[in-house]
Image: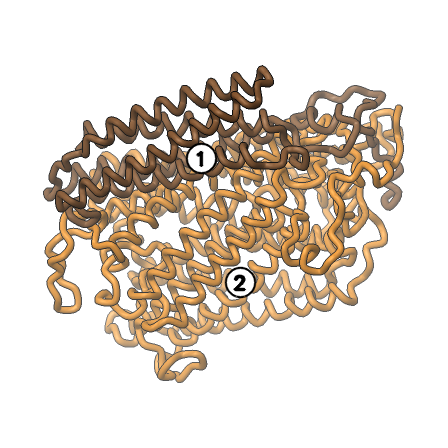
Chain colours: A brown, B orange
């Protein structure tokens, strides 16, 4: 009996189903119906993205709570005058969330050329946002506010840099969707575009949160 | 009924042929699991060597030692060894082997998947971990040597640089960078584990049919996902305090090494403690939960009984995981926190006793009346339960703020966390290794040598750590490098001598394990049968060692719970999860 277990194992060839219908497990989408190699189900990418966002939330919440605690505990906190360009940057980023929605709608309708244009526009707005953030840094530097000048400015640089780094990852994903050879990929361009747009909206929302924190909490 | 072996055409992905793709930059979860275990094995012997040097110094403070600059160990060198011992053991052993090592190898197989959800990400997690180890170990070789701030690296001394002591310069910076890299690696790994568990389970593998090992890896991965981001943020701020002149954690008015620190002000060292322990307490469970899963699995298999109270065991795992995020303050009772906060943290901490007691009760319930076979895996699993109880009980003492004020910085705490977090988790790993070795390598570890290894280790760890409780009660502080230099500690020196002898004894016993491991890989008894332990879970349905894509491209179907042992009416005393109901032989 032991040793011959493999003969007893109930193996189900993809697509054919077994004689006794077992209760549904979790991973029953990818393997069961495609008939070919067992791919990773599409939803796994969304699960992974959500988990990644959860980790990012924990990271930024740690920084945000440190900001609040440090402000409350220290006696050396000075208000940092926020550069006005941040308002412009915020509008740019909000606009990019709109353009990415339009781009995805074009892709759903199969309008590839239009999709690429809107996607390029989103990418451009993302790069413009980052450039705007650098301009904000420059503005602060010219006013003598450096990373170590004051806890308020320290947090400003840290939070904007951390958000910028994550947003740069989003820009990389935007380029990836444009230039990847999708014939050789495990996922479709539409899925990749959807994943990227979720991440992009999240970065947008995260910036709004940070901007409010920096504005109200400074 | 379609019952057949599938051809190779349904493979998930093709096995690589070259040595580098197959063994170095492999995307196969099994190879990556072995890579993690190998990394942990190297680290555990390194960490043990550091502790041996420390223990020898504590017994014979004036003895010249190898690898120590100048021969006789200074207090600073002692602290450097202590810091690196703790860091390497916690991160590179306790976090790495039970979860990333065994979890990587067996989680996909036990849920019927061909690989992890994201194999390339999996490879990246391992090599990032490897890079982290290299950066941390590099701290030994830079000017000033390894950091001396302990594995918790409390500021302000960890944030001030060289002025705070040897090792607090480049060594500490490397430590922080290495830890930040480790955070990134752990986050990638956790993401992969959770996604795989949620989305890649085979047909019929409902949550209620997942082996408790899978449950424990799953919950551990959730803890890691939520905890390591916090540590990463803390490391970032600490690094900036060191290299960019910020004052997140450094208060004003400090005098360090006869120098008044004027370039920092206003920071809060307690902020670091909050961030660190918000990560640090879940980290304890990251180390121990996989051991709980393995212990449940092994106890059930070798008692030939279902796990007593499977659902309660799952609930207890979730409960421990959740409460793990609510109790970080009990590491900070001596920080001057409000007594009301301390009271809340104390109550929450003691609440963990409830799921812990459920688990212990159910382990004993699993053993009760079972047809027990004392294999090495079983012995180590029972040893795990013993150590978990012993280490856990002292946790109840430390959960009282008033008692903790006295015991916190004493050897009592050293005894507590070594038993519950260190040794118990390592016993879980040993149970896992003895249990799964035949599946992983096609050969058994030698059981006779293994039993000698078990009894020597089991006795040895108690001989080391039980006396430390008494040292703590007697007021012996932690982190002192030479008790002979302190008058009131003179009477305790014989206890330290005894512990050192016990440590030499126990570490020597690990050479027996190392011999068994290396010898059995080459000459061990061959595991002719696929399922030598007559176990129920999916890994025992495939050859030993498993083929590249585990199930030859076909998807197994699950019909049973994970612990159907001694089922009334069945001819055999176990029903594999993958056996169709009509194929179960009747008595």
**Percent of width and height locating residue A40:** 66, 33
In this rendering, does residue A69 appear at all?
A: yes
Residue B393 vs residue A2: left or right? left
**Percent of width and height locating residue B467:** 42, 63
Residue under pointer 2: B44
- Output the chain of dot 2: B
**Percent of width and height locating residue B258:** 13, 68
Q: Residue at x 18, y 34 (%)?
A: A82
Secondary structure at numbered mark 1:
helix
State which quarter of the image contains the N terminus of chain B: top right
Label 1 CA crowd tier, 10 Å (few <14, some 14–19, many 20+): many
- Output the chain of dot 1: A
Q: Report if the CB atoms under discs 2 and 1 are less than 8 Å apart.
A: no
State which quarter of the image contains the C terminus of chain B: top right
| Mark in the foreground, 2 or 1 | 1
Q: Residue at x 13, y 40 (%)?
A: A77
Of residues B289 and A153, the one drawn nearer to the viewer in this rendering: A153
As measured in the structure, the alpha-carbon distance from the residue carrying label 2 to the one carrying label 1 is: 39 Å
Of residues A84 and A149, the one drawn nearer to the viewer in this rendering: A84
Q: Which mark is residue A194?
A: none
Of residues B45 and A49, the one drawn nearer to the viewer in this rendering: A49
In this rendering, does residue B339 appear at all?
A: no
Q: Is residue A28 above or below residue B88?
A: above
Q: Is residue B528 above or below residue A157?
A: below
Q: Which mark is residue A170?
A: 1
Q: For residue A207, which quarter of the picture?
A: top left
């Amino acid at each position: 009996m032991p040793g011959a277990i493999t003969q007893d194992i109930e193996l189900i060839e993809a697509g054919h189903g077994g004689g006794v219908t077992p209760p549904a497990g979790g991973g029953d989408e990818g393997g069961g119906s495609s008939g070919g190699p067992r791919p990773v189900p599409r939803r796994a990418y969304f699960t992974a993205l959500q988990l990644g966002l959860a980790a990012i939330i924990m990271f930024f919440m740690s920084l945000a709570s440190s900001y609040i605690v440090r402000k409350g505990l220290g006696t050396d906190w000075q208000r940092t005058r926020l550069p006005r360009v941040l308002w412009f940057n915020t509008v740019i980023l909000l606009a990019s969330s709109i353009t990415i929605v339009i781009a995805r709608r074009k892709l759903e309708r199969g309008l590839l050329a239009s999709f690429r244009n809107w996607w390029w526009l989103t990418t451009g707005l993302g790069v413009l946002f980052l450039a705007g953030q650098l301009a904000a840094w420059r503005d602060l530097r010219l006013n003598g506010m450096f990373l170590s000048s004051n806890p308020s400015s320290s947090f400003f640089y840290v939070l904007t840099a951390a958000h910028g780094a994550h947003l740069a990852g989003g820009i990389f994903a935007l380029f990836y969707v444009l230039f990847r050879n999708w014939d050789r990929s495990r996922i479709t361009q539409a899925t990749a575009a959807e994943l990227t747009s979720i991440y992009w909206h999240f970065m947008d929302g995260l910036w709004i949160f940070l901007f409010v924190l920096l504005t109200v909490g400074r | 009924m379609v019952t057949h072996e599938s051809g190779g055409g349904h493979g998930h992905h093709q096995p690589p042929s070259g040595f580098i793709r197959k063994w170095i930059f492999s995307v196969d979860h099994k190879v990556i699991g072995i890579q993690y275990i190998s990394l942990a094995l190297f680290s555990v012997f390194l960490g043990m060597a550091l502790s041996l040097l420390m223990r020898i110094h504590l017994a014979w403070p004036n003895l010249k030692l190898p690898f120590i600059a100048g021969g006789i160990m200074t207090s600073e060198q002692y602290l450097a060894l202590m810091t690196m011992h703790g860091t390497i053991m916690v991160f590179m052993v306790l976090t790495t082997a039970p979860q990333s090592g065994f979890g990587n190898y067996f989680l996909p197989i036990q849920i019927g998947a061909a690989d992890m959800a994201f194999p390339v990400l999996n490879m990246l997690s391992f090599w990032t971990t490897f890079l982290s180890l290299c950066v941390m170990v590099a701290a030994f070789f830079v000017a000033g040597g390894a950091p001396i701030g302990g594995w918790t690296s409390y500021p302000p001394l960890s944030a001030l640089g060289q002025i705070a002591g040897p090792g607090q310069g480049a060594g500490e910076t490397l430590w922080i960078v290495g830890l930040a890299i480790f955070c990134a690696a752990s986050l990638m790994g956790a993401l992969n584990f959770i996604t795989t568990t949620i989305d890649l389970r085979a047909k019929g593998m409902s949550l209620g049919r997942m082996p408790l090992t899978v449950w424990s890896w799953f919950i551990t991965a959730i803890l890691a996902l939520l905890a390591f981001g916090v540590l990463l943020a803390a490391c970032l701020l600490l690094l900036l305090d060191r290299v960019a002149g910020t004052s997140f954690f450094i208060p004003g008015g400090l005098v360090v090494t006869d120098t008044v620190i004027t370039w920092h002000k206003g920071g809060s060292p307690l902020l670091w403690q909050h961030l660190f322990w918000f990560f640090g307490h879940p980290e304890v469970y990251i180390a121990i939960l996989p051991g709980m899963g393995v212990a449940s699995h092994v106890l059930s298999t070798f008692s030939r009984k279902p796990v007593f109270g499977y659902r309660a065991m799952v609930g207890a795992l979730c409960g421990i995981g959740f409460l793990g995020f609510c109790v970080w303050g009990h590491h900070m009772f001596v920080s001057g926190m409000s007594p009301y906060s301390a009271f809340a943290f104390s109550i929450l901490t003691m609440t963990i006793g409830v799921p812990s007691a459920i688990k212990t009760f159910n382990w004993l319930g699993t053993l009760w009346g079972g047809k027990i076979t004392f294999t090495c895996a079983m012995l180590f699993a029972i040893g795990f339960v013993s150590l978990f109880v012993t280490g856990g009980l002292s946790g109840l003492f430390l959960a009282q703020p008033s008692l903790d004020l006295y015991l916190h910085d004493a050897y009592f705490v050293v005894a507590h966390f070594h038993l519950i977090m260190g040794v118990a988790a390592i016993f879980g790993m040993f149970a896992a290794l003895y249990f799964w070795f035949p599946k992983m390598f096609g050969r058994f570890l030698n059981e006779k040598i293994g039993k000698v290894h078990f009894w020597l280790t089991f006795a040895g760890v108690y001989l080391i750590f039980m006396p430390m409780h008494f040292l703590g009660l007697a007021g012996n502080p932690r982190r002192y490098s030479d008790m002979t230099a302190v008058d009131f500690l003179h009477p305790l020196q014989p206890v330290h001598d005894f512990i050192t002898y016990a440590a030499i004894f126990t570490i020597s016993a690990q050479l027996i394990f190392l011999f068994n491991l290396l010898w059995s890989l080459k000459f061990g008894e061959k595991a002719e049968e696929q399922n030598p332990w007559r176990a129920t879970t999916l890994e025992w349905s495939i050859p030993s060692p498993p083929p590249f894509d585990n199930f030859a491209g076909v998807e197994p179907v699950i019909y049973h719970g994970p612990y159907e042992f001694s089922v009334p009416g069945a001819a055999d005393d176990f029903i594999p999860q993958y056996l169709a109901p009509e194929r179960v032989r009747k008595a």
